[in-house]
Structure formats: C-alpha cells, structure tokens
C-alpha cells in the first residue's frame, strides 16, 4: 500500500487492541500518512495507536497526531515486534495521561532506522528488544515520570536492545533525579551515540542512567557509569536552538566512532541520506559530518 492517508480511526472495545490505524504483518507501506487515530474505549493495553507492525516494511511515512487518553499504552505512535520501519517522521503523538506509558515507539523486536522521533509527550522510545539505528530522538518529557514503569524521557533499553548512531537530546523529565531523561539503560548495547543535553539540569545529572549492558564509544555530558571509549564533551551541534543537530567539522563527535557496528552494510547512509562513513571513520550520532576541512579565516 502506498501514498495513502489513514486518519481518525478508533477502537471501541477489546483487550490489547492492535492499533487503530494500520496493522502490518508483511508487505510494504510506503509514503503514507497515519494521523489522529485514537482508541475510544478498551481495557488492557493499546498496542500502537497509529501502527502495529510485526513484519514487512514501513518506509517514508508520516506518523503524527495519534493519541490515547487511557493510562495503559504501549506505543502512542506505533508498536513494532518485527520488520523494518525506515525514513519516517514520528512527531507529535501525545500521551494524555501519565501512568503506565511505554513510549511513543514501543519495540519488542524489529528495526527502526533513519527516523525522526520528536515531541511525542512523556517519552520517546521504549525498547524491550530490537534495534534503533541512525535516529534523532528529541523533545520528550511533558510532565513527571510515572512510578509504574521505568522513568525516562528519551530512550529506555532493556534485555538485548541495540542502539547505534543515534542522537538523543533535549528530553526532560521534571522530576528526574538520576539522569534518566536521556537514556535509561538496563541491558542491551549502545554504540556511537550522542546522549547529551537532556534533563532538567544536565550539567549536574547528565543524560544517562546506566545499570547494565554495553555502553561503548558514545558522547555524553557527564561521565558514564559503565562502558569504555566514551567521550565527555559538548558535541557542538550546528544550531541546537533551531533544531539543527548536525555536526561541525573538527569537533569531538567527528571521526570518533567504531566502524565495526557497520560491518556487513552496503553503502549505509545517515539520517540525511549521506554516506554513513566519511573520511574513513564513522562519526557519532545520527548525522555524518560532510563539511569540508579547509582553511578557516576568522575576522574579529
């Protein structure tokens, strides 16, 4: 299915409803819009208000305005247990309540790559398993953390989850006391990411709360409790205030990554669609810096 709009659908009754918009177990959903879908009434969890995905491919889609007024929601925007979701814009899918909210994107498997995941209310991506790659996760945390689930705003990782070359920034929980606003990690593997500038006071708390897993070769704002090869620095985004999280040449995140996570990929690209490995060594975060390294003249 391609070039379609799925809008303003809802479910009435049922336990663990599988999306109000689209359920996909195979095939391809291409260049579609899934917006303003909302469960009217149900009991148990709603699994993906806009999209429920257990296989197939979803590509170049806009997923926005989907919402749930109930306490129990796994994926206000989408729920994925298999397949690949790529090149999508997942923006503005709000949580109405604050209890038992398991992410705008809820993953139990599958791959989410090269996606913008932004301003979706209380929290961004909750990963029981699966792979998050080359994504920008920003602007979550509208309120305080629930006491019923792991407190986080940007990304929460459990089990064998994998997060590679993502940028997690500008996510804030007002009652954060541990640094969990950016990345809360209880398992899995996180490599080549920028996790910086999250939390109500990132200069003190930092952007990470790590209790288990492999956390290597990432850029953070406060020294990570676990892992090796991590950098504590300002990534020097091009223009953070305007939402431009690309990198300036010759700053800490450039040519600082581990190429090994891209072994086996044929011509991988970053979030802009540019070559993922430039100048032989991969950069950190979701954008590869392609700015030239020539002479710079500064006038005062």
Image (cartoon, rainbow, N blue to C red):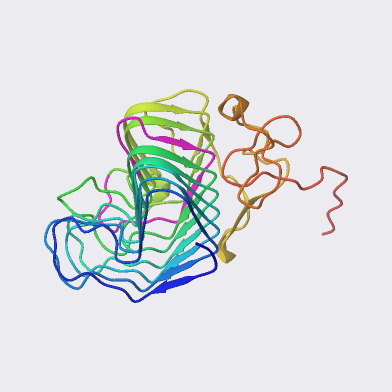
Is residue 91 visible in the rendered structure shown here? yes
The foreground one among 256 and 130 is 130
The foreground one among 49 and 295 is 49
Give the magenta-colored segment's residue range. Answer: 156-177
Q: Which of the 4 image quarters holds residue 71?
A: bottom left
The residue drawn where x is 76% and y is 34% is: 279
Residue 21 rendering spot, x and y as whole percentages: 35, 66
* Residue 142 magenta-highlighted: no
Side of 13 where 73 appears, left or right:
right
The residue drawn where x is 59% and y is 24% is: 260
Q: Is residue 19 above or below residue 222?
A: below
Side of 80 where 230 appears, left or right:
right
Q: Looking at this rendering, what residue extends furthest in the bottom direction?
A: 8
Is residue 221 visible in the rendered structure shown here? no
The foreground one among 14 and 89 is 14
Residue 203 rendering spot, x and y as whole percentages: 43, 47
Side of 154 where 245 appears, left or right:
right
Residue 123 rendering spot, x and y as whole percentages: 33, 56
The foreground one among 297 and 199 is 199
* Residue 158 magenta-highlighted: yes
The C terminus is located in which quarter? bottom right
The residue drawn where x is 26% and y is 72% is: 10
Q: Looking at this rendering, what residue extends furthest in the left direction?
A: 43
The total of numbered circles placed on residues is 0
Q: Main secondary structure of the magenta part?
A: loop
Q: Is residue 137 above or below residue 165?
A: below
Residue 14 rendering spot, x and y as whole percentages: 14, 62
């Amino acid at each position: 299915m391609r070039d379609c709009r799925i809008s303003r659908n809802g479910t009435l009754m049922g336990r663990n409803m599988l999306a109000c918009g689209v359920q996909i177990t195979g095939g391809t959903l291409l260049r579609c819009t899934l917006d303003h879908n909302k469960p009217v009434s149900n009991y148990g969890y709603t699994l993906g208000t806009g999209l429920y995905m257990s296989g197939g491919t979803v590509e170049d889609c806009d997923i926005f305005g989907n919402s749930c007024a109930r306490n129990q929601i796994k994926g206000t925007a989408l729920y994925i247990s298999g397949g690949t979701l790529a090149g999508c814009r997942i923006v503005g899918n709000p949580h109405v309540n604050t209890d038992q909210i398991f992410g705008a994107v809820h993953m139990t498997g599958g791959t989410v790559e090269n996606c913008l995941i932004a301003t979706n209310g209380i929290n961004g991506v909750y990963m029981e398993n699966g792979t998050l790659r080359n994504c920008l996760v920003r602007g979550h945390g509208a309120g305080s953390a629930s006491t019923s689930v792991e407190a986080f705003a940007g990304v929460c990782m459990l089990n064998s989850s994998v997060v590679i070359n993502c940028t997690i920034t500008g996510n804030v929980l007002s009652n954060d006391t541990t640094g969990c606003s950016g990345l809360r990690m209880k398992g899995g593997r996180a490599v080549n990411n920028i996790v910086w500038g999250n939390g109500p006071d990132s200069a003190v708390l930092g952007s990470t709360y790590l209790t288990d897993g492999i956390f290597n070769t990432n850029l953070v704002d406060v020294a990570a409790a676990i892992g090796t090869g991590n950098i504590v620095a300002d990534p020097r985004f091009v223009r953070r205030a305007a939402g431009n999280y690309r990198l300036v040449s010759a700053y800490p995140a450039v040519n600082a990554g581990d190429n090994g996570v891209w072994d086996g990929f044929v011509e991988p690209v970053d979030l802009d669609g540019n070559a993922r490995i430039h100048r032989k060594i991969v950069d950190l975060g979701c954008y590869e810096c392609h700015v030239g390294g020539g002479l710079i003249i500064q006038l005062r």
